[in-house]
Amino acid sequence: MTNASAGQADFKKSDISSRVNNRSLRPDSESFARFMTEGWGPENPDVAPNESSKWIPARLEALGRHYRGERLVIPAGRPKVRNNDDDYPFRPDTVFAYYTGLGEDYEAGAVLVLDPNDPADEAAKGTHTPILFLHPRANHDTTDFYRSSAYGEYWVGARPGLDEFHVMTGLETRDISGLDECLSHNVGTGDSQVKLRVIKESDPAITAEVDRIREAAGLDDKAANDEGDNDFHETAAVARMLKDDYEIGEMRKAILATRHGFDNILRHLDESVDKPRGERVLEGAFNAVSRIEGNDVGYGTIIASGPDGPTLHWMRNTHTVRRQDMLLIDAGVETQSLYTADITRTFPVTGTFNPVQRKLYQAVFDAQQAGFEAAQPGRTYSDIHHACMRSLAESLHEWGVLKVPVKEALSPEGQQHRRWHACGVAHHLGLDVHDCAQARYEEYQGAKLTPGMIFTIEPGLYFRENDLLIPEEFRGIGIRIEDDVLMTERGPEWLSKSVIPSTIDEVEAWMKEERGKTAERR
């Protein structure tokens, strides 16, 4: 057998998972290793305490009080594969971001552990000691500098190390290599032993390790472990329902950046009309602003023109924008701290609402206002929903579209009006666009609206192009108006309406102003 054929045979026998490394040749000699770790000047990230670090101790203290004597495990998560060996940009798990204040992309694989303190020390130390386990810097002093595409600074640039993360977060930091020892210490069922809870969805490898430790310690009741982990996740979600002043400030930043994104869409609107994939021209205009003024978009941008408008989550954005169409845009900028706005506006592409468009838009606007007026401290999410639904049902009945009495439609046995609005009209908003989703129904829909909550109000009318039960002039029109609301002691406050126009006259004036800026540049 020749050397060439021997090599081919060895290749065929090799594990397929190792073949991803065949696309490049990496030097691996000892002399090269020495050469790559010598002759470099210092490269130390300049860091300062995160603004969020002032708020983290109170969040951790509140969480710890729920689980005295238990060890709590909150992973950041790992990059998710897009295809083959190419990952999506990393975004830390929401629970991790909330309890560390970290929103950048350089802590993949990190884990926050709340280690229980002895009850005798609680008065001085609190219920838990928070410890942030991280990969240390893979700078030019290490061979990982050039070997690790995940952490090597030759690949990903200089990143904070343990000392820098301590400065940024105020938390004790340790090398990730010590995580297993921390997790397994004193785990068991005796009086002096501790139990583990983990945010199990964020990092399967960490969850598997927690399960292994539990099983080795005799805590192998899967149903009980799952119940405990789910309760932990629910508690963390409910905690995020009430925003502190830092979070409210971040939401205001996200909304202002989102306004700038919508401005940019309107400045590019005319160049999108009658162009193949014109919706993507507008998507690109918004997303560019999100990357300049924030971390990214907070969710997939919806650019739905004409008959795409009634599709609730139209995110292909592949169709042509026509001059006679309505244009529904649902988009939000995510700040560097990962808080996101969630705004929907519906525009007449011509810049002026025709009579049918005006009538439908005003009905949705009125429904949103009804929801806002129903959103008072002590009332519930359900009250917002019912107020919006009543307003929409009354409009549909007035137009002759809803053939049954409004009272019958609003009854649990009726609901005929929901053909044109099958989704909900409100949700919590913050680090996730649908924030606090792990909370139970009674803690969410059934809970009282409380000062500090931030949520959307987003009624709409969705008239599909092939809907034969509506007037022909309604078909292919989708309208949604969505704004972000802060509940205060005095009642609801529009966070976004003062920043982003929404009345018919305001929208028309806004479109004219931004198009005028485009004309001036030409």
Image (cartoon, rainbow, N blue to C red):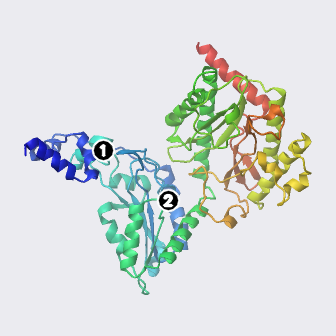
Image x and y of residue 511, in percent:
70, 25
Residue 387, disc: none
Q: Nearer the viewer, residue 317 or 188?
A: 317
Q: Are circles 2 and 1 on residues that touch, CB within 8 Å?
A: no
Image x and y of residue 33, in percent:
14, 46
Residue 290 is at least partly visible in this image: yes
Image x and y of residue 204, in percent:
42, 61
Relative to 260, residue 167 above or below:
below
Q: Secondary structure at mark 1?
A: loop
Using the numbered discs, state the Cα–Cα distance from disc 2 to disc 1 in whole angstroms: 26 Å
Instruction: Point out the frontmost of discs 2 and 1.
Output: 2
Relative to 40, residue 491 above or below:
below
Residue located beneath label 2 in the image: 99
Residue beneath the point at 37% across and 74% down: 213
Q: Nearer the viewer, residue 99 or 197?
A: 197
Q: Mark 2 or mark 1, which has the lower sequence index?
A: 1
Residue beneath the point at 47% across and 64% down: 200
> Label 2 is placed on what type of residue?
Tyr
Which residue is at the far front? 1
Q: Nearer the viewer, residue 203 or 310?
A: 310
Which residue is at the far top? 522
Quadrant of the rendering where the C terminus is positioned: top right
Image x and y of residue 371, in percent:
79, 50
Residue located beneath label 1 in the image: 44
